[in-house]
Image (spheres, grey):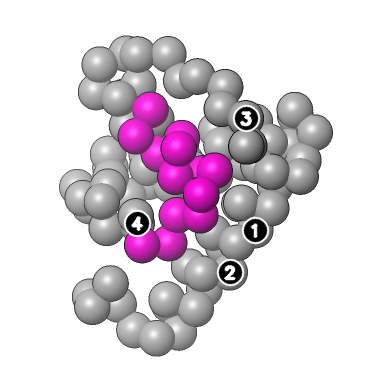
Amino acid sequence: SRWIGRAVRARLDAAFDLIEHLVVHGDDYVSGLAVMGCLEGMQMATVTSRGVDFEAFRPWLRPLPAKYWDPINRFWQEGVTIPTIHSD
């Protein structure tokens, strides 16, 4: 996270807090939108399109979205289905 400034880190913190909230507290539609729309969209916009290492975002991943991060990456690399993961 050294490669970005304090203001950007604060925005990433806020964004990932919101994603976690949507995944954990949203209904199935909202939770799926947070995973597929936000997390997958972020990977497509940065990792796939711009060559950013997907590990660069790991410090901001909250617990439940973190469980989706690798399966989304495997989906794009290997075509493996993204599982539904429930909060504990």
Q: Residue 5, located in which quarter of the rendered image?
A: bottom left
Task: Indicate which disc, 4 or 1, sits on the residue closer to the N terminus.
Answer: 1
Residue 74 shown left or right of residue 15 in the figure:
left
Span highlighted in magenta in the image: 59-71
Label placed on residue 83: none
Check disc 4 and report the residue beneath it: 57
Q: Amino acid at mark 3?
A: His
Using the numbered discs, state the Cα–Cα distance from disc 3 to disc 1 in whole angstroms.
17 Å
Task: Indicate which disc, 4 or 3, sits on the residue closer to the N terminus.
Answer: 4
Using the numbered discs, state the Cα–Cα distance from disc 1 to disc 2 in whole angstroms.
6 Å
Task: Indicate which disc, 2 or 4, sits on the residue closer to the N terminus.
Answer: 2
Element marked by disc 2? helix
Check disc 3 and report the residue beneath it: 86
The C terminus: image quadrant:
top right
Q: Identify the residue at the far right of this view.
A: 27
The N terminus: image quadrant:
bottom left
Percent from the top left, x then y, of residue 20?
Answer: 61, 51
Check disc 1 and report the residue beneath it: 18
Percent from the top left, x then y, of residue 10?
Answer: 49, 78
Using the numbered discs, state the Cα–Cα distance from disc 4 to disc 3 in whole angstroms.
21 Å
Query: Predominant secondary structure in magenta?
Result: helix
Q: 26 or 42: nearer the eye?
A: 26
Residue 48 appears in the picture as rendered = yes
Element marked by disc 4? helix
Kindly indicate whether the residue at mark 1 contacts the one at mark 4 (C-beta within 8 angstroms). no
Within 10 Å of the Cα at label 1, are there few (<14), some (14-19), or many (20+) other Cα atoms? Answer: some
Element marked by disc 3? loop
Percent from the top left, x then y, of residue 58?
Answer: 34, 55
Check disc 2 and report the residue beneath it: 14
Q: Amino acid at mark 1?
A: Leu
Element marked by disc 1? helix
Q: Residue 87, located in which quarter of the rendered image?
A: top right
